[in-house]
Amino acid sequence: MAALVVGGAAACKKDATTTPTNNKVCGLKIGFMGGLTGDNAGLVQPMKNGAALALSQYNAAHTDCTVALVDYDSQGAPDKATPLAQGAVNDAKVVGIIGPAFSGETEATGPIFQAANLVTISPSATRPSLSTHGWKTFHRGVGNDYVQGPAAGRYIANILKPTKSFLVKDDSAYGIALSAEVEKIISSTLVGKAEVKTGDKVFTNLVGQIKTSGATVLFYGGYTAEAAPLLSQLRDAGWTGTMVGGDGINDSNFLAIGNAKAEGTIATCPCAPATSATPKFVTDYKALYNGLAPAVYADVAYDITNVLLDGIAAGKTTRPDLLAFVNAYDKKGAATGVEYKWDDKGELDLSQVLVWSFKATNGAWVPDQLIPKS
């Protein structure tokens, strides 16, 4: 089910479809699709918050003709995202989608959005192959794993410098693609590899393999739902090495295993720290969310939501018109400073893509460093 959370058709003071006196189209909707509940919601909720902030500001400036934000809670699962995507397509007032958040659900829903000319901009789906299907509706507001994976590998090789490393990936589209890129960089030190399945929670055999391998660094390609219990069990077994993961573990739920277990873990992100975004964004975010600081991808989601809102404000209120507007967009985001301009595959210019590392420190993800590009 989808729920309206910001604005709504009733908030348009004129006719809910068209205002005849000025030809405004009101009562339009932007969808947000991602895992808002479930084990990985800690990664997605900040994105939703960033999108909602953009909508609240837009609606405050357009009280006579507001736009609603609609939640499509996929729980990050492709099989749940597919019917939600069809529901969004069937709602004629939905003219754009922020998301999907994860690569697997983006892969599953891409053909549906393409067939409907419904533009999507993901704040976080990084699997490289997503841009190879010819979907003109697909865009992402960050770099892909051809950038993040090698950066994570360089961090391991050049900063941590292990003599023995171990690689574990989950079975998600994201985890498989990211791990393949990391492996290319750290292959000379790899002493073991393994794959876990989505939903796995007990890792007795794997913990034993990692411990006996002598690896001092573990790269995990996947999401918090499996990464957190794996690290917790490794710590319980006495492993003192460093886990490194991608943006899939860069969320508050991962830290719930406790400071003693999470401390020192590294998470990369093809993004800059949201807390280092423009001061106005940080101030506005904290004001709306009772002092809560913006977490990973909140600033990206804010900016890409404003891309869609810029189009609506410019009168691009049909799906084809808004899609064409996004495809021709060229403007810096007010929060990130990134120049949002996409190629014909929906990818940002590589010059706009940075990869940062974050370190689990005293129960928080703290910016660690900008990882050099070579």
Image: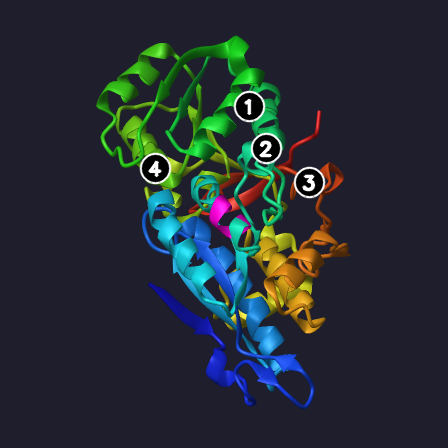
How packed is label 1: few (under 14 Cα within 10 Å), some, or many (20 or more)? Answer: some
Q: Nearer the viewer, residue 345 or 372?
A: 345
Q: Residue at x 34, y 45 (%)?
A: 79
- Residue 228, numbered circle: 4
How packed is label 3: few (under 14 Cα within 10 Å), some, or many (20 or more)? Answer: some
- Residue 306, numbered circle: none
Q: Amino acid at mark 2?
A: Gln
Q: Position of residue 155 (x, y in %)?
A: 59, 26
Q: Residue at x 57, y 36 (%)?
A: 133
What is the C-alpha distance between the residues marked 1 and 2?
Answer: 8 Å
Which residue is denoted by mark 1 in the rendering? 181
Query: In the rendered image of this protein, does residue 88 appear above or below residue 250?
Result: below
- Residue 353, numbered circle: 3
Which residue is most to the front?
A: 115
Where, by quadrant of the figure, is residue 285 drawn?
bottom right
Q: Nearer the viewer, residue 252 or 317?
A: 317
The question of residue 146 being in magenta is answered with no
For the magenta stretch, what is the residue range?
A: 110-114
Q: Residue at x 67, y 83 (%)?
A: 23
How packed is label 2: few (under 14 Cα within 10 Å), some, or many (20 or more)? Answer: many
- Report if residue 267 is visible in the image: yes
What is the C-alpha distance between the residues marked 4 and 3?
Answer: 27 Å
Q: Nearer the viewer, residue 321 or 68?
A: 321
